Image (spheres, rainbow, N blue to C red):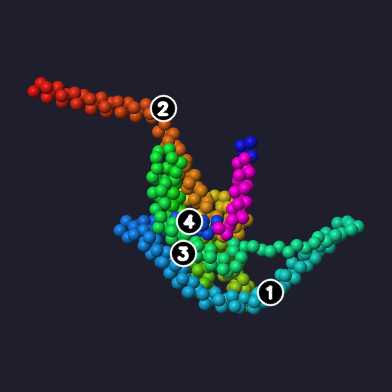
Amino acid sequence: MRHAVILLAAVALIGALKFAQSAVVPVLFASFLALILSPVVELLARHRIPRIAAATLVMAVLLAVAAAALSATWAPAREWLDTAPSTFEQLERKLRPLIRFIAKVESVSTQAERMTTPDPGRHEEPTPVALESKGFVESTQEWIIALVSMLFLTLFLLATDLASLGQNGPPGAPWRGAGAIFLRVRGELGRYFGAVTVSNLVLGVGTTITMYWLDMPNPLLWGLIAFVLNFIPYAGSAATLLLLTVVALVSFEGVGKAVWVAGTYLLLTTLEGQVLQPVLVGRRLDISPPVVLLGLWFGGWLWGVPGIALAMPLLVSVKAAAQEIARSRSAEQVETDPETVRMRASEWLRANARRYRRVAGTRAGSSGG
């Protein structure tokens, strides 16, 4: 009965999260961003800068860096988007032989299926149903509202000392250990994203240099795309590889240069993912690939692209919280162990016995004098 109740509660929670994604996703993004940036705010606060001023300064610097990166890549990105229709026409022309081959294979497969499947006497075509796709937000206005809400919530969380909230409370209170869990999750997230940022920066710089060497148009844009998308494990590097291959097929005659572009990026991302990132991240923050893939799939099913982006922060946070809870429980078990209690009681009795003898000797000496 208990397991059935837990299962029903989990299903209800997943349904609620999927239904309320427009409200939950900005809150999660703001929470993770505040967790990563809060050490900088606390460093400024220790130098006697008001916490709200420190939070505002950190957010202003973050927005300035994002605006500078967007400004540097806006012109080439807009030019590429403007030429997208002609780009896809050229791509279709170059891939026409492959498309024809796939069409012939599908035709042969369809004919074989018709030959092996008996013809029913009555075949009713299903009524087509138009499905309206619904993404993270439904319009530009909702995008703007979600982004502004996320920024203001991040500022509010940075201006609040969340770690002290969980540390203040009577012993045995349910929120007593929340501060330790908060600090553990914040530390693990900071270390993870710090290491991944350095690793992705190396990949972005390497991609920019190699794309410039291979005469790819807008090499800075591709370096920035490689840097940003690589925060999403596996899916990000696959999307970058697909984009680079498509643009290379359109930009150069033949397929030789496109193979060079795809091969060099594949080599770079393999070295980054298999050599550099494991060295920087370390085993303590490492999560097994099947769990990562399952988290990416579940996040994509639940919230789409934002869910894929949130998968790794959620996995790192859950792992860090579970490790801190297990550590605190083992510490409590050691403290309540009978042998430990007996040893501490013996030490207390010995210490008080020495103190009693010392006090008694002092009194005897004073009375004898």
Q: Quadrant of the N terminus?
A: top right
Mark 4, residue position: 31
Position above or below: 201 against 350? below
Sequence-first disc among 4 and 1: 4
Image point (83%, 59%), residue name = 113
**Residue 232: percent from left, percent from top:** 54, 59
- Which range is magenta? 5-23
Mark 2: give few (<14), some (14-19) or many (20+) Cα within 10 Å.
few
Mark 1, residue position: 92
Mark 3, residue position: 201
Q: Is residue 166 visible?
A: yes
Label 2 with label 3: CB-CB less than 8 Å: no
Q: Is residue 268 visible?
A: no
Foreground: disc 2 or disc 1: 2
Q: Nearer the viewer, residue 47 or 74?
A: 47
Sequence-first disc among 1 and 3: 1
* SS type, badge 1: helix
Tell me which secondary structure the magenta stretch mostly adopts: helix
Sequence-first disc among 4 and 3: 4
| Amino acid type for the residue under numbered disc 2 | Pro
Q: Marks 4 and 3, Cα distance to the nearest angstrom?
A: 24 Å
| Amino acid type for the residue under numbered disc 1 | Glu
Q: Marks 2 and 3, Cα distance to the nearest angstrom?
A: 53 Å
Q: Does the magenta run of residues contain 14? A: yes
**Residue 14: percent from left, percent from top:** 61, 50
| Amino acid type for the residue under numbered disc 4 | Ser
Label 4 with label 1: CB-CB less than 8 Å: no
**Residue 355: percent from left, percent from top:** 23, 27
Mark 2, residue position: 338
Image point (15%, 26%), residue name = 362
Mark 1: give few (<14), some (14-19) or many (20+) Cα within 10 Å.
some
Foreground: disc 4 or disc 1: 4
